[in-house]
Image (cartoon, rainbow, N blue to C red):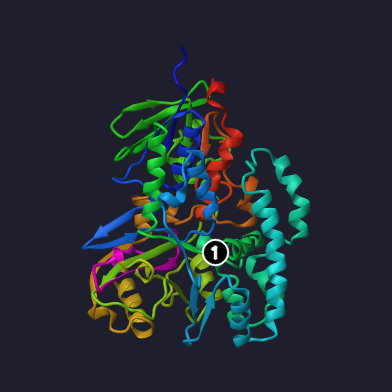
Amino acid sequence: MKQKSSAVIIGSGFGGLAAAIRLGARGYEVTVCERLDAPGGRAYVHRQDGFTFDAGPTIVTAPFILEELWELCGRRMSDDIDLREMKPFYRIRFDDGSHFDYSGDDEAMRAEIARFNPDDVAGYERFLEDSADLYKIGFDGLLYASFDRFGKMLTAAPELFRSQFYRSVHGLVARHIKHPKLRTVFSFHPLLVGGNPFTTTAVYALIAQLERRFGVHFAMGGTGRIVEGMVSLIESLGGSIRLNASVNEIFVENGRAAGVVLEGGERLAADVVVSNADSAATYRRLLPAQYRRRWTDRKLKRAKYSMSLFVWYFGTDRQYPDVPHHMMLMGERYRGLLEDIFDNKVLADDFSLYLHRPTATDPSLAPDGCDTFYVLSPVPHLDADVDWVTQAEPYRQAIERSLSDTVLPGLGDHVVTSRMLTPLGFREELFSEKGAAFGLQPVLTQTAWFRPHNKSEEVDGLYLVGAGTHPGAGMPGVISSAKVLDEIVPDPAGVP
């Protein structure tokens, strides 16, 4: 009797966990290999001095994508995960102290826009029409396409051109909205997936529509609760998670991925190998060069990578009730700062920040009377000439001073726990090429068919999920990359 077909998943980020659930539900015997001591990948959880810090993703914008995973297992996500909608989604604060509360309430949004420029209300309506078209094409039509053949790209091309996808997100916004601050408000979304608003294809304007339709949510207990729930689903299907199991190589037999070699030499044979590792690292670190024709070291070196991030996690012995759950603090420069990060690759003296205060929604994430925070600053990846070993602490201090001067008065006197993540951490702990936080940049020439394919172009039996493949970064994209496997991974009975 033929043994049950097996699948090995490299990495337990959201893409890898979703892939394990989908393959397990189809009858595969699934083993997930995670090199860290807990699952989650970029969604790892740090617990320190009574504070709980989500390491990375904090925003849930498409709950139905997660709900589908629970339904595959005959369960309801609401029984395991308590999602709360944010109102507003974000507060965007400008360097002069003015702010914009961004929400899904159309009337409130029009009122916010009118405070800055009444004439832009009509432009906002036109932008919504364009983003709705892009949502229909990019999300409804292309999200789950495998793009393993260029013909699929050609089929989609007419609608994409009609929607002016070749513009940048900022270029699309600027067609309709004139006030410079409002242009920032409606174009910053690509930064959430590692893209420069001035170069990221306009398809990503669909994010605004996604938020408007389904809201912005937070999981009570933190994003780590979603990870725990997904692990529970995998185990209910008979799958397993191996922690502290670092994969050193994908081994190939007869032109087909046949399993993985762990650090220490243990070999895990498998009928199917799915990599949730960074796509560039999958090819450069894990798949031997003799099997690579398209994604050679030279091509990977020439590719354009997302920015990296400097993240400071900290807890305070007091609360800041005036600070909302999500806040963007924009610096004096917008385009110039992005050029320094993406093009000039220099660590500028100024910065824009994303401040996350989850205790605004869930006080259990900090001791009584305290607040949990993380603040994130986009920075260049490791092609920049920055020595993060010596620069990390001065950079943190500069951010602390800025926050103390603006929204967190007296911060330096109230920090009681602290940790940092730099581009070095993204490279060394998360195996991100060049320390890029989101893998390949979502520019036009690295979108859809032009990204590393979900079905590897190099060897049979190897599949990719996560931010570095189609559809791209962000929780909806990463989890949806696993749904693409439904189309391209054969049923267990059909595996050679």
Q: Choose between 378 and 50: the one closer to the eye.
A: 50
Which residue matches tag 1?
A: 215
- Mark 1, Cα crowd under 10 Å, few <14 / some 14-19 / many 20+, is many
Res. 40 visible in picture:
no
Q: Quadrant of residue 491?
A: top right
Q: Choose between 459 and 244: the one closer to the eye.
A: 244
> Relative to residue 179, is residue 399 drawn left or right?
left
Counting from the top left corner in percent of width and height, residue 34 is at 35, 41
Counting from the top left corner in percent of width and height, residue 335 is at 56, 74
Question: Circle 1 sits in a helix, a strand or a loop, which is it?
Answer: loop
Q: Choose between 312 and 67: the one closer to the eye.
A: 67
Q: Which residues are magenta?
A: 364-390
Residue 113 on the magenta span = no
Q: Choose between 229 and 294: the one closer to the eye.
A: 229
Q: Is residue 398 above or below residue 490?
A: below
Residue that protrudes farthest toward the top in the picture? 1
Q: Report the quarter where the C terminus lies.
A: top right
Res. 237 visible in picture:
yes
Counting from the top left corner in percent of width and height, residue 370 is at 26, 72
Counting from the top left corner in percent of width and height, residue 24 is at 46, 33
Q: Who's the residue at 73% across and 48% down the image? A: 156
Q: Quadrant of residue 281?
A: top left
Please, what is the three-letter code of the amino acid marked with disc 1? Gly
